[in-house]
Image (cartoon, grey):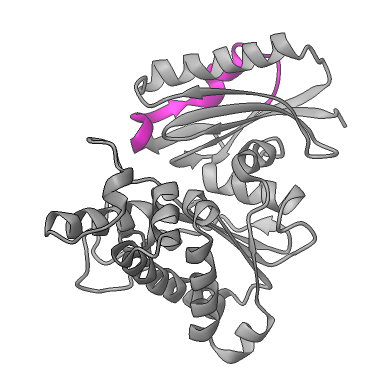
Amino acid sequence: MKKYSIGIDLGGTKILTALVDKQTGEVIHSVKKKTKKDKGPKNIIKKMIDSIDELLNETPIDDISSIGIGAAGQVDRKNGILIAAVNLDCYDLNIREKIKKHYNLPVYLGNDVEIAAMGELKFGAAKGYKDVVCIFVGTGVGSAIIKDGKIIKGATGTAGEIGHIIVDLNGRPCACGAHGCLEAYASRSAIEKRIEGALKKGRSSVIIDYMESGKSITSHMIHDAIEQGDELVTQCVNEAAEYLSGGIASVINLINPELIVLGGGLIEAVDYFYQQVIKKAKAKSLPVPASKIEFKKAGLGDYSGVIGAAFLENE
Ligand SMILES: [Zn+2]
């Protein structure tokens, strides 16, 4: 087996490309590029190729087995096609073909949550576990279900969409078109919207002092406001924790995993949120599955995706 692989985490705001030692999970070298302004298929492919070239120039290694790409969107793994990535403005993009032309290596495609979960399973918080659900909370809420050490993909390859569990039949509209999805209540964006809405109505909060005009609320601002004992922010975070823990309790009851790994920007930055969620999720689950459940924070941070992508293989 060749020792290294290139892992690419293609997200809505950045492309992280890394050379990964597959035996140790070590990131030997990485290249980060922003995607925010240059969206669309041409720009995205160019940025990926530039990233790979930079990586190979800076760390000249021959012993590379594959290029694995995890994209924030729906993917056709078998044909290497990015079906739809709204945040990247890419649709029906044959990533495999476009990247393969430039490098004499197999190219594999997966989605961003899948590779992050795979990274955590191989070298992070889920190492040594078999039945795990990884949940990532940031702009949205995504998850991957691991059964007997393998990711469950489902009939259309879209299993694990915890963000679209419906928690309120007549609830808030969700980007997917439905109403009352968990994502509309428990994501960082949902918390932001609640805080901004309350501020507009005249509620006071220390978070106003942290916000530069025209810029949005970040996970770190939420953390700092809670540390200051801010009533509004704490209330909005508690509300989100109430919904997320309800969603997680449903997952515990349905799947009966041994471990839940929680990751993503909001979990990483706001420990109060993490603690609230696990306490409430245990309380809301059925007693028997709750008695065996463990919770851990994701352990690889930004690198979970690139490490996991290095292990992508053909379906
Ligand atoms: Zn939805």
The quadrant where ligand 1 appears is bottom left
User: Is 253 placed left or right of 24 in the picture?
Assistant: left
Q: Is residue 104 magenta?
A: yes
Residue 276 or residue 246, whichever sits in front:
276
Q: Residue at x 36, y 23 (%)?
A: 39
> Given the current orientation, which residue lies at the most extreme bottom position?
287
Asked if residue 123 is positioned above or below residue 165 in the image, the reply reads above
Q: Which residue is drawn at 46% across and 73% down?
A: 245
> Given the current orientation, which residue lies at the most extreme left position?
201
Residue 92 or residue 306, whichever sits in front:
306
In x, y percent, where is residue 193? 25, 54
Asked if residue 114 is positioned above or below residue 194 in the image, the reply reads above
Asked if residue 5 is positioned above or below residue 154 in the image, the reply reads above
In x, y percent, where is residue 3? 85, 29
Q: Residue at x 78, y 35 (%)?
A: 26
Q: Residue at x 24, y 74 (%)?
A: 169
Q: Splitting the image into 4 quarters, where does residue 53 fall?
A: top right
Q: In which quarter of the image is the N terminus?
A: top right
Residue 313 visible? The answer is no
Q: Splitting the image into 4 quarters, where does residue 194 fall?
A: bottom left
Q: Does the magenta stretch include residue 85?
A: no
> Given the current orientation, which residue lies at the most extreme top position?
57
In x, y percent, where is residue 124? 72, 51
Residue 83 visible? The answer is yes
Magenta residues? 86-106
